[in-house]
Image (tube, rainbow, N blue to C red):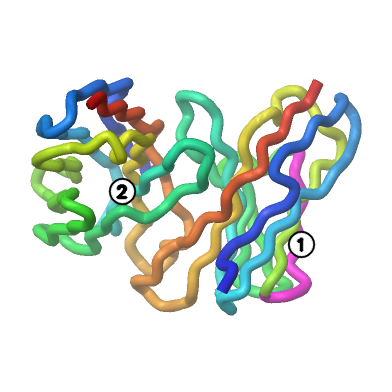
């Protein structure tokens, strides 16, 4: 198993540009989430999904869109990037069971100029 | 809402020293509690967890006990190594089964010197 994979590893954008951060998992996990990590802030939940076709907002959803067309993939879209979205983004997944562990991807470092 | 407060770092120790990183939480009911570790340039890895009061999670020499009465989940290790240098995050997931939504503390950077 590759686990949770994320692409790209690093990206530089200009203000107003759009892009999609990719996340995929090969563990057949129902639940997937996106977090952003900022210095001194820990990780904060952006959006999450409890299954294909179902998404919901987390703590800091503004400026981000998600979709879940398959169990494996959960892309995060920035429609018009802003400098405040400079961060490290982590995707995570877990199975349905009550005591399942969340597995995190290696992260995407995004710089918005 | 739920929140996690953990000891702010950075923490610098010498090899073989004793480590404590404090973590307290605010949540209703009986959340599950976690410690995650992030090594330089990597994603987060689960270090240990506890799902009910008085449970002790342990892994790689690290331990933490779920204390409901003090709403705490302090991380300890008796003898740290240089390879333990990393950022440590305390986290909780709410009771009731929705534990795909984690609430994290701000993280504590640990540096262990030889």
List x then y, in percent, for residue B49. 27, 58
Q: Is residue B60 left or right of residue A92?
A: left
Can residue A69 be found in the magenta stretch? yes
The answer to whether the residues at label 2 and label 1 have Cβ atoms under 8 Å apart is: no
Decide: is B24 above or below B31.
above
SS at mark 1 in the image:
loop
Q: Please state if A80 lies on the left or on the right of B70 as rendered.
A: right
Q: Residues within 10 Å of mark 2 (few under 14, many from 20)?
A: many
Residue A46 at x, y percent in the picture: 62, 46
Q: Is residue B20 magenta?
A: no
Circle nearer the viewer, 2 or 1? 2
Is residue A58 toward the left or the right of residue B44 in the image? right
Q: Which secondary structure is most common in the magenta stretch?
A: loop
Point out residue A85 in the picture as x, y percentages from the top left corner.
71, 30
Q: Which disc is residue B27 wearing?
A: none
Task: Residue B93: name its quadrant.
Answer: bottom left
Q: Which image quadrant: the N terminus of chain B?
A: top left
Give residue B97's position: percent from left, percent from top.
Answer: 39, 69
In the picture, measured across the screen, residue A54 lies left or right of residue A113, that is left
Image position of B56 with respect to B71: above or below: below
Return the residue nearer the eye: B83 or A31. B83
The residues tagged by marks 2 and 1 sit, at their Cα atoms, a distance apart of 29 Å
Are the numbered discs 2 and 1 placed on the same chain, yes or no?
A: no
Chain identity of mark 2: B
**Residue at the spot 42% in from the left edge and 46% down from the top edge:** B103
Q: Which residue is mark 2?
A: B35
**Disc 2 secondary structure class:** strand
**Residue lying at 40% horizontally and 31% vertically, measured from the top left:** B106
Query: Over which residues does the magenta segment extend?
Result: A63-71
**Protein chain holding label 1:** A
Q: Would you place residue A7 above or below residue B23 in this image?
A: below
The mark found on residue A67 in the picture is: 1
């Amino acid at each position: 198993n590759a686990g949770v994979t994320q692409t790209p590893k690093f990206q530089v954008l200009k203000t107003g540009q759009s892009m999609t951060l990719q996340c995929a998992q090969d563990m057949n996990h129902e639940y997937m989430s996106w977090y952003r990590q900022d210095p001194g802030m820990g990780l904060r939940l952006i959006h999450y999904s409890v299954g294909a076709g179902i998404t919901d907002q987390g703590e800091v959803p503004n400026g981000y869109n998600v979709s879940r067309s398959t169990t494996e993939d959960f892309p995060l879209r920035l429609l018009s990037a802003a400098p405040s979205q400079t961060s490290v983004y982590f995707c995570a997944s877990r199975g349905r069971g009550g005591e399942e562990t969340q597995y995190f991807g290696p992260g995407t470092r995004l710089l918005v100029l | 809402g739920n929140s996690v407060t953990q000891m702010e770092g950075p923490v610098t120790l010498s090899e073989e020293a004793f480590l404590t990183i404090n973590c307290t939480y605010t949540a209703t009911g009986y959340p599950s509690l976690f410690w995650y570790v992030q090594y330089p340039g990597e994603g987060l890895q689960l270090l240990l967890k506890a799902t009910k009061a008085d449970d002790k999670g342990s892994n790689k020499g690290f331990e933490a006990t779920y204390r409901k009465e003090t709403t705490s989940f302090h991380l300890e290790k008796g003898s740290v190594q240089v390879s333990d240098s990393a950022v440590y995050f305390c986290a909780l997931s709410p009771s009731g089964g929705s534990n795909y939504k984690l609430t994290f503390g701000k993280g504590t950077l640990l540096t262990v010197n030889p």
